[in-house]
Image (spheres, rainbow, N blue to C red):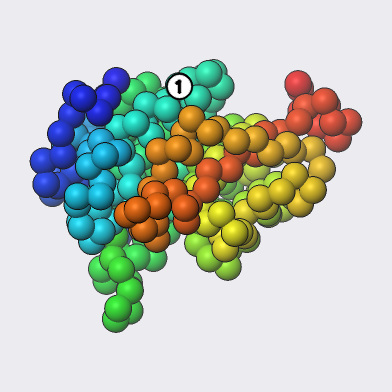
Amino acid sequence: MHGAAQTAWVGGGMPRQTDFKTSAQQSAGDWDDLYHQAQSASLDPLPGFSELGKISRDELFRDLGYTFWNCELLDALLIRLRAEGNLQWVELAAGTGRLTAELARRGVRIAATDDYSQAPEAVRARERTICYGRWVGRLSAREALATFSPEAVVCAWPPLGSWLVPDLLAGQVAGSERLRLIVCIGDPNGATEAPVHAHELAAGWVLASWLECARWLMGFNDPVDAPGSHSRLLVYRRDFTWEGNKTDGA
């Protein structure tokens, strides 16, 4: 497991160039294939949390995506995800796929997916481009759910206007029937449309906080002197004591 004292940012933590494909080259793949590709990704060390403020935002975005993954955040997430058991995970709107690669190489059963809408050949002028890892299957979030029917999903910064998390909680996405856990990173004021209050949840779900993970959050919109102030980690857990969920086998 990485720790802040064990690694050092080397000026480019992105996957090596041979690990990238253009969106035209990447296909959806199957879950096992994407998982094994993520496990074998060639990666430079992640930065420690204290190093993030010393690196330009453009470089961090290029290498890590909208959430600036760091050693401490990965260590904390890993403990939590392992405690959930041997679930089948899918990362939705995965971007670079860095989170999935870091988790997969540590034994979490996870596959990354994205619709490649920010590939260089797809974006308009002034829009930021993303270099997708070859282990990121080309599937929209809804296609990924319908294809893989995962037990748990993680999504950092769902696409604006997608209403992805509310629709997942309401059971309005094909393939969401097996979902037990949804982990979402987004704006604390709900700009990513993810519910931030318990009373906003669909019946059968409860809202939790993983504070030991959230303390290490820093994203593209966070000021250097206030890390995490524009990011929030939300955890939605299916409540199997609710009458409507008892047919799910819990």
In percent of the image, x 59 and y 59: which residue is there?
Answer: 189
| Residue 143 pos. (x, y %) | 53, 53
Which quadrant of the figure has residue 9?
A: top left
Camera-side residue: 241 or 173? 241
In percent of the image, x 55 and y 40: which residue is there?
Answer: 183
Camera sees residue 242 = yes
| Residue 226 pos. (x, y %) | 40, 52
Amino acid type for the residue under numbered disc 1: Ile
| Residue 201 pos. (x, y %) | 75, 47
Q: Where 113 sits versus 193, above or below? A: above
**Position of 240 compared to 33: left or right?**
right
Which quadrant of the figure has residue 100?
A: top left
In percent of the image, x 30 and y 38: which residue is there?
Answer: 49
Q: Quadrant of the N terminus?
A: top left
In percent of the image, x 25 and y 59: which residue is there?
Answer: 57
Q: Which residue is mark 1?
A: 79
- Residue most extreme to the right: 243
Q: Quadrant of the C terminus?
A: top right
Camera-side residue: 240 or 34? 240
| Residue 155 pos. (x, y %) | 49, 47
Q: Secondary structure beneath disc 1?
A: helix
**Position of 105 compared to 59: left or right?**
right
Camera sees residue 18 = no
Mark 1 surroundings within 10 Å by alpha-carbon count, few (fewer than 14), some (14 through 19), many (20 or more): few
**Position of 64 compared to 143: left or right?**
left
Camera-side residue: 160 or 33? 160
